[in-house]
Amino acid sequence: MTGEDELAELDADSLHNSEALPTRRPHPVIIAAGLTARGGLLWLPVAGLLAVAGKPKAAKKALTAAVIAMPIGHLISLVVHRRRPQAAGIPARQALPEHPDSSSFPSKHAVTAAAFGTATALADRGAAVFVTPLVLLVAYSRLRTRVHWPTDVLGGLAIGALVALAQAGIGRSASARATACRLAAMVRPVFSDHS
């Protein structure tokens, strides 16, 4: 069985009742996680809590990564047209008041959550201990309520993490350039005096 076949089987199995993904109505916390993360709104108060907790740098980087990641997720979904799971009759799906009809891939909730979580982890590992479970809860909520296929959520998590990693790399490059410019400004007078 190829990797592609395994992913297809994973997606197909996600519509069946299982211990990990029961078909009954989810716990209200799971429903709330999916609803509050819509449009990335959940991450605003989380960033605020990080800032109040004395981690403003992590809050800024995480929120910036989420803001960058969200439109990227939407752009990808415009290119990749994928139908959402046919789960209208499943109680887990009926628990959500929303009935999205946009492309299923990637899960924009997962993209934004992963970008926020990864950027937090890169900026402050201590803060990541509190943020990561929330990221995973949001991702799980999209599977548990059958709004997305597992590969939509996994793809979304990967895309979000890549956005945060790219942001960190660009930030380090900009910081390195700024440091080099400051050093050059300090060293230049020394050499000009001896010319």
Image (tube, rainbow, N blue to C red):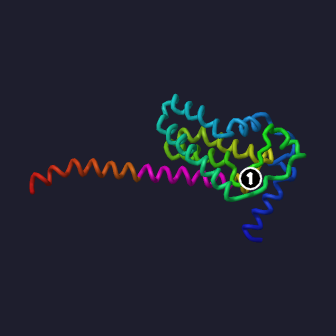
Which kind of residue does numbered mark 1 sit on?
Answer: Ser
Quadrant including the N terminus: bottom right
Left or right: where does residue 189 sit relative to residue 47? left
Q: Residue lying at the far right in this picture: please name it.
A: 89
Residue carrying label 1: 104
Residue 151 rendering spot, x and y as whole percentages: 72, 57
Q: Secondary structure at mark 1?
A: loop
Quadrant including the C terminus: bottom left
Task: Work out whether residue 154 or residue 76 is closer to the camera in this orientation and state it.
Answer: 76
Q: Residue lying at the far top in this picture: please name it.
A: 52
Residue 142 rendering spot, x and y as whole percentages: 74, 46
Task: Work out whether residue 5 or residue 121 is closer to the camera in this orientation and state it.
Answer: 5
> Which quarter of the picture shows residue 191?
bottom left
Q: Which residues are magenta?
A: 154-172
For residue 159: magenta? yes
Residue 117 rendering spot, x and y as whole percentages: 59, 44
> Which quarter of the picture shows residue 9?
bottom right
> Which quarter of the picture shows residue 162?
bottom right
Q: Main secondary structure of the magenta part?
A: helix
For residue 164: magenta? yes
Q: Residue at x 14, y 51 (%)?
A: 190
Left or right: where does residue 169 sit relative to residue 148? left
Q: Residue at x 51, y 54 (%)?
A: 166
Q: Residue at x 78, y 55 (%)?
A: 83
